[in-house]
């Protein structure tokens, strides 16, 4: 089944098929396209990776990270005023009081909530959309953990820090890799259906930049399986965990000593605001893919608008590595309906190869992601060897049929069921014909700075997962983000419990810090009249935007 | 599809739909209200094109989160169809409504340490599965093409693992439950069965447990501390020189030359 491709594309696919027998023989003989040297990596990154050029970036004019250069779409949000700056509300009687407030209902937030609840604390988990709506559900390929005999956290550490170009926060890498086997064991005990051998041993594979096979998976919906298990377990803890859906935090509450005291939530459906007083607050709001830096398509969930970053920054939290973004090498470039969607690295882990318009390999399939992405952009933009789609997008082939040739018929469908269905809907059988891919905005490497106990620079405020920065340095390897959210989510829950046991108790919460931030913005001449956080992306057409007349609707 | 270099700049429009000049438009009906939208869009993008800004009914936009279950008919056809809004392409005459939430029954407590046999546990938590009349509407409704009635039949027979595996692709959108004449919340039964399967009906990984024990004993903390203190140059040398496990090595077979850091 390949009627999903145009006749022109089917013609080009013949070149892929022509080169396949030889590539298959080489793969079987263990012969791979040569990996790049460190110098070659630097060269392609400097010339073709979007983070390494000045286009679309400017210096931030306010706050603890003033002067650092970030993507403009993010700066626009940070250089905006709060919608609650001049609000007249009685904050003296909080609507909710709890031990721990978790902001964000993905894997990081859920694991923080479960860990705090296991310590006997009362938890409120407030989330913008449904519980589980997150990038966690979209992570397909796997979760790393050094649990096999030839491996250990030591080698996992080396892979992480090498993949991050030795720029990572080392204490965070140590925490990540040390806890990984504990996380795998925890998920197994919660009833996650890992891919396993009959004797119970985990099936593990390589990922980009790994020295050992330590990628654990559950089909090609590892993140979705983790999320539905964690969400189900959270529902088992109704005694301790209260879930508030469609209730994003809009701003943090701060006491007069600069300690975080909870947050203000907004019910998205009624528009009503509620205040939560908490002894500890955990931000786990995920990434920023939906800001669409430089117009790149993204793989992210609808809710990935960086709200937590904005709130935390106004409260004085320091950010780190915020200039660094991960472009996933293999985003879908065709069909148009799937554009930007992730094609898991597992395809390459299983032996799938990247090919140019002539059906030739041009890069080792498992370079670190930034290098792989830059190499694809070079092949398309620099060398003119990309395949153009009917809508003007560019891409290279990802030869998935090779996987069935290497591992036996049915492997693609068995190992990549979600991807198989996603393409089949549009008339493309990825076991028979290759996919067309191009780099897509995937992951925010930077974020709120934390230490190895998930503490931010603001007392009483913790953060975990994609909203933080440092653990992956300037580049993250596959399978370390699912691990990151769980390791630091759990550490945040434990650290909050310890602090509360030691008597942590913020004073009355105020919104004074917002007034201060607004004033600084005006004084610096940066006030454009914009407000943030964004909360929901806006994909309206120009015509609809004009028809909204720039007037507040009478009904909302 | 040439190699000329001017032609190499790709289109960059994020997730906004900008129809090409020659795009053809079709009329669809969103909850009874007609809108002109470009053909080939998914329902989700067509609704955004029409001016909707989603609060509910939109999630991952990639067919895995279950937020955007949708019912639709094509004008003139009696058949009720289902799909995910993010994965279903609009058709002329489509009349659609999303079901972003559906009331469901989830049994309150799941004990994974119980000695109760798995089939009894499921039968006790969800006795309503035995009211299944075998109509197959759930299976026909499922946007993931899962044989829902089939896995419920496995559970009735006591094959919890078989049903769990059959349900594995479930995204918990709830459309099956919305059409069940026996009021079964199939997707919640399957969730419970999968967790029982993972925790109780599949052998635990002994290798993982052994490694976790080593971590708890503090074995790796000094090794990791050593790496944290090391100069960048030494770290780079270690990185470049590390051995790579062969791709086709069988589990537990290959061991590195240097085994002092295991």
Image (spheres, rainbow, N blue to C red):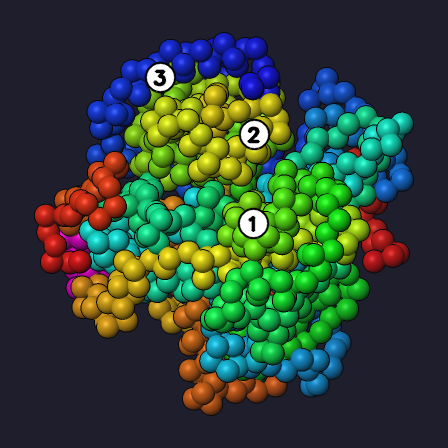
Image side of residue A104 versus residue B260, left or right: right
Check if residue B228 falls in the magenta segment. yes
Pointer 3 with pointer 2, Cβ within 8 A: no
Name the spot of residue A549 as percent of width and height, x first.
83, 45
Name the spot of residue B251 as percent of width and height, x first.
25, 46
Residue of label 3: A20
Mark-to-mark CA distance, 3 and 2: 21 Å
The span picked out in magenta is B225-236
Query: Would you identify the image quadrant in which residue A384 lies?
Result: top left
Residue of label 2: A423
Dominant secondary structure of the magenta stretch? helix
Disc 1 is attached to a residue of which chain? B
What mark, if any, has residue A7 been given in the picture?
A: none
Name the spot of residue A551 as percent of width and height, x first.
83, 51
Element at label 3: helix
Name the spot of residue B193 as percent of width and height, x first.
55, 57
- The mark that comes first in sequence, 3 or 2, is 3
Mark-to-mark CA distance, 3 and 1: 38 Å
- Disc 2 with disc 1 on a shared chain: no
The relative height of residue B99 versus residue A319 in the rendered view (above or below) is above
Disc 3 is attached to a residue of which chain? A
Q: Nearer the viewer, residue A480 or B235?
A: A480
Disc 2 is attached to a residue of which chain? A
Residue of label 1: B163
Quadrant the C terminus of chain B occupies: bottom left
């Amino acid at each position: 089944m390949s009627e999903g491709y145009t006749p022109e594309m089917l013609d080009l696919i013949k070149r892929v098929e022509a080169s396949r027998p030889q590539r298959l023989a080489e793969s079987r003989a263990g012969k791979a396209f040569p990996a790049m040297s460190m110098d070659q990596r630097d060269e392609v990154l400097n010339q073709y990776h979007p983070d390494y050029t000045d286009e679309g970036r400017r210096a931030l004019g306010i706050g603890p990270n003033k002067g650092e250069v970030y993507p403009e779409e993010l700066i626009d949000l940070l250089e905006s005023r709060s919608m609650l700056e001049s609000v007249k509300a009685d904050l003296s009687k909080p609507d909710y009081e709890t031990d721990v407030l978790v902001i964000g209902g993905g894997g990081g937030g859920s694991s923080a909530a479960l860990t705090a609840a296991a310590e006997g604390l009362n938890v409120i988990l407030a989330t913008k959309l449904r519980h589980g709506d997150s990038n966690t559900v979209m992570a397909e390929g796997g979760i790393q953990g050094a649990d096999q005999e030839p491996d250990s956290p030591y080698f996992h550490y080396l892979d992480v820090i090498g993949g991050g170009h030795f720029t990572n926060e080392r204490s965070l890498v140590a925490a990540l890799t040390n806890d990984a086997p504990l996380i795998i064991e925890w998920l197994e005990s919660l009833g996650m259906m890992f891919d396993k051998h009959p004797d119970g041993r985990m099936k593990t594979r390589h990922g980009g930049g790994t020295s050992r096979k330590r990628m654990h998976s559950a089909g090609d919906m590892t993140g979705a399986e983790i999320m539905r298990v964690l969400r189900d377990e959270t529902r088992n803890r109704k005694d301790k965990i209260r879930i508030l859906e469609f209730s994003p935090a809009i701003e943090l509450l701060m006491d007069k000593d600069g300690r975080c005291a909870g947050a203000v939530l907004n019910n998205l459906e009624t528009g009503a605001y509620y205040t939560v007083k908490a002894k500890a607050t955990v931000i786990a709001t995920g990434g920023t893919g939906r800001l669409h830096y430089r117009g790149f398509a993204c793989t992210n969930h609808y809710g990935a608008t960086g709200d937590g970053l904005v709130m935390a920054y106004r409260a004085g939290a320091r950010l780190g590595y915020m200039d660094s973004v991960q472009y996933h090498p293999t985003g879908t470039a065709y069909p148009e309906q799937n554009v930007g969607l992730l094609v898991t690295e597992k395809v390459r882990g299983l032996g799938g190869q990247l090919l140019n318009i002539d059906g030739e390999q041009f890069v080792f399939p498992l370079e670190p992601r930034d290098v792989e992405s830059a190499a694809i952009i070079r092949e398309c933009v620099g060398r003119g060897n990309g395949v153009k789609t009917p809508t003007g997008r560019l891409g290279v082939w990802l030869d998935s049929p090779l996987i069935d040739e290497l591992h036996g018929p049915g492997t693609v469908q068995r190992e990549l069921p979600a991807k198989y269905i996603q393409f089949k809907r549009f008339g493309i059988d990825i076991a028979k014909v290759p996919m067309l891919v191009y780099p897509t905005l995937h992951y925010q490497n930077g974020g709120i700075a934390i230490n190895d106990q998930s503490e931010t620079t603001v007392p009483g405020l913790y953060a975990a997962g994609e909203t933080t920065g440092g653990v992956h340095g300037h580049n993250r390897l596959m399978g370390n983000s699912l691990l990151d959210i769980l390791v630091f989510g759990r550490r945040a829950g434990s650290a909050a419990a310890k602090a509360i046991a030691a008597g942590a108790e913020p004073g009355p919460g105020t919104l004074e810090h917002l007034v201060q931030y607004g004033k600084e913005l005006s004084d610096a001449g940066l006030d454009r009249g914009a407000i943030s956080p964004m909360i929901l992306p806006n994909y309206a057409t120009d015509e609809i935007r004009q028809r909204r007349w720039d007037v507040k609707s009478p009904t909302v | 599809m040439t190699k000329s270099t001017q032609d190499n700049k790709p289109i960059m429009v994020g997730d906004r739909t900008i129809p090409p000049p020659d795009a053809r438009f079709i009329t669809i009906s969103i909850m009874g209200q007609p809108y002109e939208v470009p053909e080939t869009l998914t329902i989700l993008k067509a609704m955004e094109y029409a001016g909707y800004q989603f609060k509910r009914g939109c999630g991952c936009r990639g067919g895995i989160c279950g937020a955007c279950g949708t019912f639709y008919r094509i004008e003139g056809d009696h058949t009720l169809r289902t799909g995910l809004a993010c994965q279903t392409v609009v058709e002329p005459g489509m009349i659609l409504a999303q079901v972003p939430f559906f009331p469901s029954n989830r049994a309150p407590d799941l004990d994974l340490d119980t000695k109760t046999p798995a089939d009894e546990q499921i039968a006790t938590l969800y006795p309503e599965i035995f009211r299944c009349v075998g109509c197959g509407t759930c299976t026909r409704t499922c946007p993931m093409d899962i044989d829902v009635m089939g896995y419920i039949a496995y559970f009735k027979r006591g094959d919890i693992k078989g049903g769990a595996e059959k349900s594995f692709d479930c995204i918990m959108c709830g459309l099956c439950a919305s059409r069940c004449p026996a009021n079964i919340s199939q997707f919640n039964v399957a969730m419970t069965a999968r967790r029982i399967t993972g925790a109780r009906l599949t052998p635990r990984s002994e290798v993982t447990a052994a490694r976790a024990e080593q971590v708890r004993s503090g074995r790796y903390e000094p090794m990791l501390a050593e790496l944290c203190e090391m100069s960048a140059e030494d770290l780079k040398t270690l990185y470049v020189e590390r051995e790579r496990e062969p791709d086709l090595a069988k589990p537990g077979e290959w061991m590195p030359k240097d085994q002092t850091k295991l």
